[in-house]
Image (tube, grey):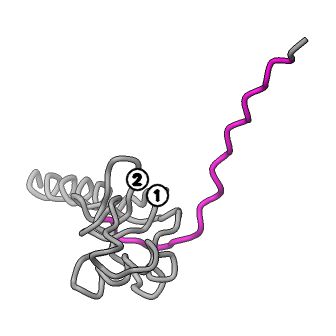
Amino acid sequence: MKDGIILFLATFFAITTLAQEKTFTGVISDSMCTTNHMLKEMKAANQAECVRKCVKDSFDYALVVGKDYYILKGNPEELDKYAAQRVTVKGTLQGDTLTATSVTPAPAKPSKPAAKKKASH
């Protein structure tokens, strides 16, 4: 009886810990460049093209969130569509790997109001 309860509790906690879906907002990049795209070296015209070339060269997609990044797994066509774009990803995180269940464009960041100039008299 005790073993059954312990097994149930261990399974319950493992499932709830691993299966919790979370939401992250960041930029889709690749595990080679993350935030420093090597446009010249990759002969890429822009960041999106650099991401695609790095992924084609066997690097993983990555989601850059602030100074952190996560290896991003999911539908390759969907990830490719949003290469170098700011997105919101819903998915499960295990270690440093984020498995996406959905990827959508992120809302625009609020712009900072322009500094007011002092009136000169």
Question: Percent from the top left, x then y, of residue 74?
Answer: 38, 79
41 and 52: which is toward the camera: 41
Q: Bounds of the magenta span?
A: 98-119
Q: Is residue 96 above or below residue 39?
A: above
Name the residue furthest left.
3
Residue that appears at 40% across and 53% down: 65
From the image, tell me which residue sits under label 2: 65
* Discs 1, 2 touching: Cβ within 8 Å: yes
Question: Percent from the top left, x then y, of residue 83?
Answer: 46, 75
| Tag 1 secondary structure | strand
Labelled disc at residue 72: none
The quadrant of the picture occupied by the C terminus is: top right
Q: Is residue 55 above or below residue 19?
A: below
| Tag 2 secondary structure | strand
Question: Percent from the top left, x then y, of residue 93?
Answer: 31, 60
**Disc 2 residue type (three-letter):** Val
| Quadrant of residue 99 within the rendered picture | bottom left
